[in-house]
Structure formats: C-alpha cells, structure tokens
Amino acid sequence: MTWSESELAALPRSEFAFPGALRDRLVAAILDGSKTTTTGLLVDYEHEGEALPEVGARYGVPDSEERLVAVIEVTDVRVVPLAEVDLAHAVAEGEGDTSVAGWRATHEGFWHGAEMREALGDETFTVDDSTMAVLERFRLIADLHG
C-alpha cells in the first residue's frame, strides 16, 4: 500500500520511548520485524488523557528526529498487572530479553528514570507487581524509512 502525505499526517502517533538511543533501537527493531509488542503503563495513558489503543488502529511511528518511518496496526491489547506479563510478550518486544525477570529489570529502569517521572509529574514514581500494564501486539504494515 502506498500512503499519501495527507493519510500519513492524519495518523495518530505511537512513540516508542523518548527521543534518543533507546527510541532508535526500538524503531529499528520494529522495522526489522523483531519487535511486535510493546508495554505501556495504564497510569501514563490516564495522565496524558489518552484512550487505550484498540485492535485495528493504525499508528505512524516516528524516529528520534520526529520523521515517520513506519506504520503499525494493533492486533491485540491486554491490560494486566505487571506480575502477569508473560515470556512470549517479553521476547516479542525485540529487546533481546530471554526471561521475564530481565525484561522487567530493563523496563523498571526506564519507568523509574528521570524522563518518565518528569512526564508523569511524580519524581518518586515506582512500579510494583500490581501496577497495571497495557500490553500491545502490533504488526508492521508500512516501512517508510527507505
């Protein structure tokens, strides 16, 4: 499918991490097909006043320079406590994790980081097993970076 500039401009954005090295790695993993899931925090959606993603929704994926490089389509959404994140989801995030514990440690480092705490307006924000996570599965439907 060919996307017109107006179609691309009309797409909501799905930003992975904050601009920088982590976003660049995540976007590269989407483009090479190794990243097909992502995890957000319900509290972040609530704080931003954003609706949860819905199956069938399509999003433009920007790189760190805010250029759209991909279009993804949501294929599944689950809201579960962090304690219920499974290995299949963790591996499909495409970050090289081979255990839920490793996935969790990496993600806690991000969620407990200064940028996330600033985005939430809570300098002491932490997650625990009961923190509600939004688990999203998606498929790449357009690679726009070429």
Image (cartoon, helix red, strand yellow):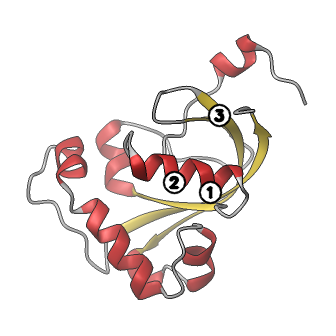
Amino acid bearing label 3: Val
Report whether 49 appears left or right of 115: right
What residue lies at 61% left-to-right and 62% top-to-bottom? 37
Amino acid bearing label 1: Ala
Q: Which tag, 1 or 3, sits closer to the chain's start?
A: 1
Q: Depth check: give the residue in front, 29 or 103.
A: 29
Spatial separation of the CA atoms under disc 1 and disc 3: 12 Å
In the figure, residue 19 lies in which quadrant?
Answer: top left
Spatial separation of the CA atoms under disc 1 and disc 2: 6 Å
Give the residue at mark 2: 25
Report whether 28 appears left or right of 64: right
**Considering the numbered disc 1 on the image, is that residue within a helix, a strand or a loop?**
helix
Give the residue at mark 3: 69
Spatial separation of the CA atoms under disc 3 and disc 2: 13 Å
Q: How far from the left and from the top, in percent, is residue 9?
A: 64, 17
Numbered-mark total: 3
Give the residue at mark 1: 29
Report whether 23 appears left or right of 34: left
Q: How far from the left and from the top, in percent, is residue 139?
A: 75, 53
Q: How far from the left and from the top, in percent, is residue 35?
A: 64, 61
What residue lies at 72% left-to-right and 11% top-to-bottom? 6
What residue lies at 26% left-to-right and 77% top-to-bottom? 128
**Number of residues whose C-alpha sits closer than 10 Å to that of mark 3, classed few (under 14), some (14–19) or many (20 or more):** some
**Disc 1 to disc 2: CB gap under 8 Å:** yes
**Disc 1 to disc 3: CB gap under 8 Å:** no
Amino acid bearing label 2: Arg
What residue lies at 40% left-to-right and 87% top-to-bottom? 101
Report whether 136 appears left or right of 102: right
**Considering the numbered disc 2 on the image, is that residue within a helix, a strand or a loop?**
helix
